[in-house]
Structure formats: structure tokens, C-alpha cells
């Protein structure tokens, strides 16, 4: 097996393994990593459709991960009581 084929098989394994993780955040991070491996593979074999498709997948995974973290932070801030100056609440 060539190094090129190895990259493709590792990308396949990483992507497939993402479905075994229960957490949505973990799934998105692993899928983003797999997509980046596919981007490398696509460049090496000269397949721009593979590159473009996986750039889109990686960007969507990163965007949705960041958006979920932002929503979680906002939700946490909204649930915390505001402290008044002077230590009184």
C-alpha cells in the first residue's frame, strides 16, 4: 500500500469512527479532522471535487462546533445571577 492510499484509508477510518461517539461536539471535531485528511488526499491525487467537498464539510463542522460552544456560553451567562456593585445581589 502506498502512502497516498494510506492517507485515504486513514481518512475513511477516522470519518467512519466518528459515528461511534455519542457527543455531538466530539462527532463534529472528528468529522472535521477526517475532512481535512480528505482535503490532503484530494490535493495529492489532483481531485478538486474531493478537495472542495471536504473543505465545505470541514468548514461546516468547525462552524457548527463554534456556534454550539457560543450558545452554551450564552446560556450559562443567562442563567447566572448578576452581581451588583459592592458585593450585594
Image: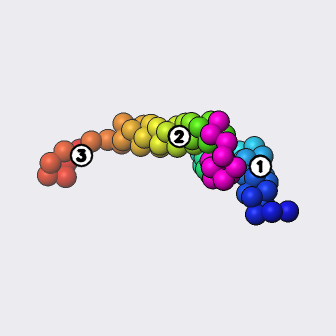
Answer with left or right where residue 84 lies relative to residue 20: left
Label 1: few (<14), some or many (≥20) within 10 Å? some
**Toward the viewer: 39 or 33?**
39
Element type at mark 1: helix
Quadrant the C terminus occupies: top left
Answer with left or right where residue 3 lies relative to residue 73: right
**Toward the viewer: 4 or 88?**
4
Q: Is residue 42 magenta?
A: yes
* Viewer-side label of 2, 3: 2
* Distance from the alpha carbon under mark 1 to that under mark 3: 50 Å
Answer with left or right where residue 85 lies relative to residue 38: left
Quadrant the N terminus occupies: bottom right
User: Mark 2 and 3 residues: CB-CB less than 8 Å, in contact?
Assistant: no
Label 3: few (<14), some or many (≥20) within 10 Å? few
Quickly name the residue at label 1: 12
Q: Quadrant of residue 56?
A: top right
Q: Quadrant of residue 24?
A: top right
Q: Residue at x 78, y 60 (%)?
A: 6
Q: Is residue 23 magenta?
A: no
Q: Position of residue 70 (x, y in %)?
A: 42, 40
**Toward the viewer: 32 or 24?**
32
* Viewer-side label of 1, 3: 1
Indicate which disc, 2 or 1, sits on the residue closer to the N terminus: 1
Our reading of the magenta stretch's main secondary structure is helix
Element type at mark 3: loop
Identify whether 64 is placed above or below 88: above
Label 2: few (<14), some or many (≥20) within 10 Å? some
Quickly name the residue at label 3: 83
- Looking at the rendering, the stretch of residues picked out in magenta corresponds to 39-49
Indicate which disc, 2 or 3, sits on the residue closer to the N terminus: 2
Q: Which mark is residue 59?
A: 2
Amino acid at each position: 500500500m502506498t502512502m497516498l492510499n494510506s492517507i485515504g484509508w486513514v481518512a475513511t477510518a477516522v470519518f467512519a469512527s466518528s459515528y461511534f461517539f455519542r457527543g455531538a461536539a466530539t462527532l463534529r471535531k472528528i468529522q472535521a479532522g477526517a475532512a481535512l485528511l480528505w482535503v490532503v488526499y484530494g490535493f495529492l491525487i489532483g481531485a478538486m471535487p474531493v478537495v472542495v467537498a471536504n473543505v465545505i464539510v470541514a468548514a461546516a463542522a468547525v462552524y457548527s462546533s463554534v456556534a454550539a460552544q457560543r450558545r452554551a456560553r450564552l446560556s450559562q451567562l443567562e442563567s447566572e445571577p448578576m452581581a451588583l456593585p459592592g458585593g450585594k445581589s
